[in-house]
Amino acid sequence: MADIEKVEGHVADEDAVTVSGVYKWFGAFNVLIDVNLRVRRGERVVICGPSGSGKSTLIRCINALEDYQRGEIVVNGMELTQNLKRIDEVRREVGMVFQQFNLFPHLTVLENCTLAPIHVRRMPKREAEELARKYLARVRIPEQADKYPGQLSGGQQQRVAIARALCMHPRIMMFDEPTSALDPEMVKEVLDTMVELARDGMTMIVVTHEMGFARQIADRMVFMDAGQIVEINTPEAFFNNPQHERTKLFLKQILN
Amino acid sequence: MTAHSDDLVFVRAEPARALPPPLTRTGVPGWLRANLFSTPLNTLLTVVTIAFIVALAYPTIRFLFVDAVWSGTDGAACLPHGGREVGACWPFVYERLGYFTFGSYPLAQRWRVDLFFVLLAFGAVWLLRLDAPRRDLGAAYFFVVLPIVSYILLCGAPAIGLPAVDTALWGGMLVTIVVATVGIVVSLPLGILLALGRRSRMPAVRFFSVVFIEFVRGVPLITVLFMASVMLPLFVPPEWSPDKLLRALVGMCLFAAAYQAEVVRAGLEAIPQGQYEAARALGMRYWRMQRLVVLPQALRVTIPNILNSFIALFKDTSLVFFVGIFDFLKTVEIARVDPKWAAPTVSATGYAFAAAVYFVFCYSMARYADGLERRLGRADRR
């Protein structure tokens, strides 16, 4: 995936995502409390924490699937506002992979991958199909292109979802617990795909409980609890010498 | 090699062979035994059902075919003779077939209606056959070309030598098909818009949709038709007063749209939130997301219900006779009391014929819905 490296190369000194002082409420419940996070280009950030801690909500705010009430989020130099055009621009920069895959069941694998390039990016159909086949080959399922999502295993579906997001040429990929809905024996194939993506220099923000994977790819670990970021650390320090009491407790529970 | 239940360790030395099924499970006797005579209760039900079918079919077949009168020029042919009632009076249907089909449409101009039927059938086949070539052209033909051509053809255009035919002269199958087709074609898109409106995040749009749907659904179709026919002229200047058929069409479309909206809404509710999120994350805005992701799935799951409401709509067209329009059923109704065909079985014949015609249309729609569902079902497994 040389083209992504090229894109990343000449602006590598800029921040990909900046979240500053973000607050969000669901009704009266404060789900995000003063969240501050900078993700540099080419950086891999893994966010972990107990369920309900606001990790998913945070990354959903970054591509405007959720709104927030206070603070500022800047993606690739563009401030996220309620302006629809700006939201479109931001979403074009950000690819998203969901826990439940969310493939379009009425379309074939290939059509899933070409739908947005053709209708959103206005790419000619032939070109979009070439692109889709290229990414399907990268996630190692080129032979499934003409099947429907329902005919694939969970792991294969999630890899299609990754290919579908990549077809929009995002600069940043976000993963919202991408392996949580998978049978154990399929987790590895998805993680392997993500490791390869990381190796190619993609900027990645990953919400996951897969600590082995996190150790392998993360540049930085972010630990959230009760809507706040409690600790940001390098993987070595995070796993071997966590600073915050809450982090220690969480790691003790999840690693045993 | 045999495994005993008390064996603690068992290793099969070679794979066991699959055997053919026992004779009692195969062939006609097997099938009969398994399906019709498996238990005493099942046997009893089989016998009762067969008796019931015979009891029903026998007099029906006698009336429609065996005792039926097949030729004649007036009611005298169908009078009882030899002290025995005759069956169906088919010459009556045969003679009035033109009236049943065209109503009072002028005889010399009926070729225009025939042409309309042919154009409509052609368009319907092109549009409805999933494997037909260039279905995009088919849709353009059906939704743009056909309405314009049909309007000119049926209403007339003196400028190009087609004498105008007032809609008051239209009748029979022509009216039934025009009302049903327009109702179906207009109500689905209108219903989709109303369903989307009802789920909209904009309160004004939602309010309008809810009020419209609930109001129209809360009144009988006849009321809607009366209102369209009596109240519509109050809202427009008299010189623009829409003609009677158009008024009924408007009422019919609005009524069907409200029902269609609820059918479509049920389909929309079935789409998981994740589909919306995935579409939005890929950069789609509202209408594109609806058109490419949401509606194709929502309509697919509701096809049986949509087709079902089309069938209901087709039969409901018979209610337009309440506002003075001579649809197919009304022409049968008028013809059967014609003194020329005064004979005891004429009414029954007319109704039997009407029922058969409605059945053919509705059953075809049901069969089509079945086939469509099965074809589209392939992609439905998630």
Image: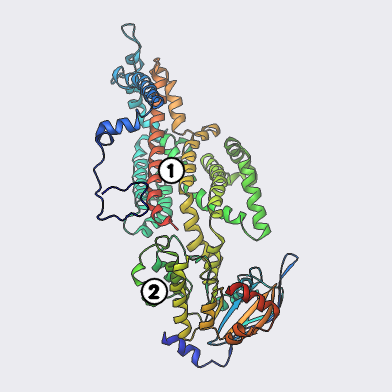
Residue placed at 25% from the left, 32% from the top?
B28
Q: Nearer the viewer, residue B145 or B213?
A: B213
- Hey, which quadrant is residue B328 in on the image? top left
Q: Chain of mark 2?
A: A
Q: Residue B53 location, x and y as percent?
A: 37, 23
Label 2 sits on a secondary structure element that is: helix
**Direction right: furthest residue:** A28
Mark 2–mark 1 distance (CA, rounded to whole Å): 62 Å
- Disc count in the image? 2
Q: Give the side of residue B74 with respect to residue A105, left or right.
A: left
Residue placed at 34% from the left, 19% from the top?
B58
Residue A171 visible within the image: no
Residue A29 visible within the image: yes
Q: Residue B369 location, x and y as percent?
A: 41, 45
Residue at label 2? A136
Under mark 2, the amino acid is Leu
Q: Residue A139 location, x and y as percent?
A: 40, 75
Q: Residue A150 location, x and y as percent?
A: 42, 60
Q: Chain of mark 1?
A: B
- How many residues crowd mark 2 within 10 Å: few (<14), some (14–19), many (20+)? many
**Direction top: furthest residue:** B83
Label 1 sits on a secondary structure element that is: loop
Residue placed at 38% from the left, 59% from the top?
B136
Q: Nearer the viewer, residue B299 or B167?
A: B299
Q: Nearer the viewer, residue B305 or A162?
A: A162
Q: Nearer the viewer, residue B222 or A80?
A: A80
Residue at label 1? B164
Q: Give the side of residue A203 with respect to residue B130, left or right.
A: right
Q: Quadrant of the C terminus of chain B?
A: bottom left
- Badge 2 and badge 1 both on one subunit: no
